[in-house]
Amino acid sequence: MKRFATLLAAPLAALAFAAPAIAQDALPDLEGRTISAVTENAYYPLNFADPMTGEGIGLEYDLVNEIAKRLNAKVEWNLGAWDVMIEAVRTGQYDVGADGITITDEREEQIDFTVPFITVEQYFLVRADEDRITGAESFSENEELLFGAQPGTSAFYTAIYDVLDGDEANPRVKLFETFGASVQALKSGDVDAVIADQAASAGYIGADPGAFKQIGEAIKSEPLGLILTPGSDLVAPFDAAIEQMKADGTLDAMINKWFFEYGEGA
């Protein structure tokens, strides 16, 4: 958690001296329009079910809800599986998707993204007592070690192409339906590591003290964005709202809430 706090410290300090925030009435007015949003509820602390109420909560819920509020719109939340989410938004089944989605050139050929709302680095997440893994080289050289991953995610491709041999059928990568399931498999000893961005690592470490640790150098750095139907008239309003939230400190406050305050109280 402290390493991620350092990452956030510079942006937070910079915002304290930022130019005055754009006036809220400068944003487009969507006149009460209902926006259909989809998430998976399986990527703590970006989107997950409240353990007490079952209600969907997390950074991305707060982000999209605040965007809608600033644009004078309403949000209708839906749950969907990761493996069909991009296609469902691409074809217009939903207006916007939020699931910790990394902005990549390949995905930008299929779908429209907002501007990034956070940039995160990917690391090894291992059990707290793990001493065999110090980074990518030590993992790749020990053929007994297994990754847990959700197929089609950036973490899956990082494991395959940045750590292992580039073969997507590599038996050292065990596949799970959700990222959360791969983390549970790590905790139970069924796999030896998952690749998680700094946001998810901080969330799981904070939610389950003593169970996990983050190790090694960052494998890569990736921006996350919301996805929208190609050509959607929501792209420019969403971008404007996100930039306003960056300028007035709201986005940093949300990040602090979900990556530090919530985890410490869980």
Image: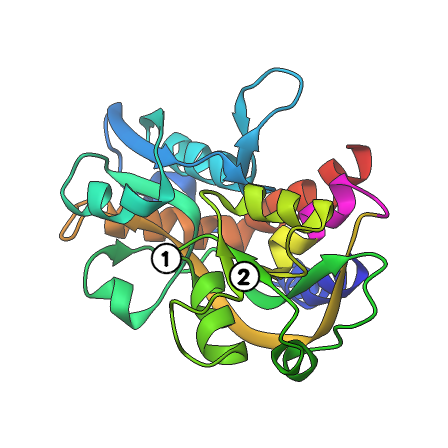
The spot of residue 104 in percent (x, y) is: 34, 68
Say whether residue 165 is left or right of residue 208.
Answer: left
Q: Give the range drawn in magenta.
A: 202-210
Label 1 residue SS: loop
Residue drawn at (45%, 50%), measured in percent from left and top? 244
Taking depth in this image into account, of 54 and 25 the one nearest to the observer is 54
Residue 258 figure quarter: top right
Taking depth in this image into account, of 245 and 62 the one nearest to the observer is 62
Decide: few, some or many residues near mark 2? Use Cα within 10 Å; few <14, some 14-19, many ≥20: few
The spot of residue 80 in percent (x, y) is: 34, 33
Residue drawn at (66%, 76%), measured in percent from left and top? 139
State which tag comes first along the sequence, 2 or 1: 2
Label 2 residue SS: loop
Say whether residue 52 is left or right of residue 265.
Answer: left
Q: Which amino acid does label 2 sit on?
A: Ala
In this figure, which residue is indicated by the disc labeled 2? 19
Decide: few, some or many residues near mark 1? Use Cα within 10 Å; few <14, some 14-19, many ≥20: few
Q: How much space separates mark 2 and mark 1, taking CA atoms?
A: 40 Å
Q: In the picture, which quadrant includes the N terminus? A: bottom right
Task: State the mark number for residue 212.
Answer: none
Residue 83 visible from this viewpoint: yes
Residue 253 visible from this viewpoint: no
Q: Which one is in front in this view, the residue at disc 2 or the one at disc 1? A: 1
In this figure, which residue is indicated by the disc labeled 1? 152
Q: Is residue 193 above or below residue 132?
A: above
Q: Is the residue under label 1 in contact with that under label 2 (CB below 8 Å)?
A: no
The spot of residue 238 in percent (x, y) is: 33, 47
